[in-house]
Amino acid sequence: MTDIREFKLISFAICPFVQRSRILLNIKAIPYEIEYIDLGSKPEWFLDRVPTGKVPALFMGNETLFESAVINEFLDEITPGSVLPDTPLERAKDRAWISLSDGLIMTQFRMMIAPDREGFEKELVSLVTGMLQFSDIAKVRATADGLTLLDAAITPVFMRLFAIPDIVAALSERLGEAPQILAWADRVLAIESVRSSVNSGFADEFLTYFADRGGYAAKAVRTGARVDAL
């Protein structure tokens, strides 16, 4: 039996994949320690235990798990009250959408690291297109109770979008045909398990990270300029 008192989550402060696992740990009320590493200078002890060299990683004594989807399903399985659907087909469908949400996270990263308005807009259009694929799911999740693994998977995208009000305004107009997507975002972002899945001052830390790397949108916010989108 796994001793959940030994859980340590290895993290990078603004990593969206780590946030997914922090949400699950919070939902399940699992006590855990968190240790932050510098992804630009990964410690040897981390590389020795995590073959992908990526976060999150979950240390449990001498045991190690990596990849957020794997970690989250493990956390769900060892605790009561599953956050996956009841039937095999519905569980498989949620897993498929969770996998698709990985692409949203990577598109969002490219959007934030884009050095100019043109690159930013290109990736924002791609992000909106990807989010619209979730329209039917959002109709259900926007008014649902609690959090599921799928909610946890897409929530980091929502939280990072809401760090820049100009983007939210642009999305509200562009997603006019699917307002339930932003309603879904509003619902999950209000839940304490989500709010406590990032450090205080997260939005500032998120923007600083990308502004320091020349990201157009983050630099605009830092200088008080408007982020022209879409």
Image: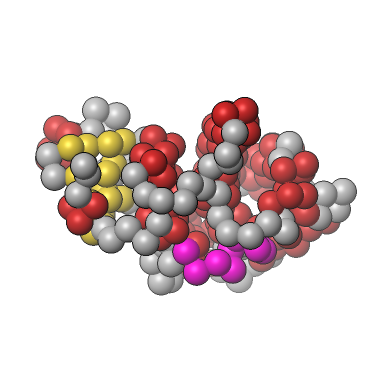
Q: Position of residue 110 (x, y in %)?
A: 55, 40
Residue 189 screen position, x and y as percent: 58, 63
- Taking the image as shown, residue 111 lies to the left or right of residue 178, namely left
Tell me where residue 10 appears, x and y as whole percent: 26, 48
Q: Is residue 93 above or below residue 30?
A: above
Residue 11 visible from this viewpoint: yes
Q: Quadrant of the N terminus?
A: top left
**Foreground of the two, 117 or 73:** 73
Chief SS of the magenta region = helix
* Residue 70 in the figure: left or right of residue 170: left
Q: Can the viewer see residue 41 in this picture?
A: no
Q: Position of residue 173 (x, y in %)?
A: 83, 56
- Quarter-of-image position of residue 120: top right
Pick out the residue farthest to the right.
177
- Magenta segment: 186-193
For the point 87% across and 48% down, which residue is it?
A: 177
43 or 212: nearer the eye? 43
Q: Is residue 138 magenta?
A: no
* Residue for point 63% across, 60% down: 145
| Relative to 121, 172 lies left or right | right
Instruction: Please give the name of the residue rendered at 68% of the width and 57% of the height, measured from the top-left corner.
Output: 144
Considering depth in this image, is 145 or 205 the residue closer to the camera?
145
Q: Residue at x 40, y 57 (%)?
A: 28
**Position of 148 relative to 53 (above/below):** below
Q: Quadrant of residue 205?
A: bottom left
Q: Quadrant of residue 61?
A: top left
* In magenta segment, residue 191: yes
Q: Identify which residue, 197 or 89, lies in the foreground.
A: 89
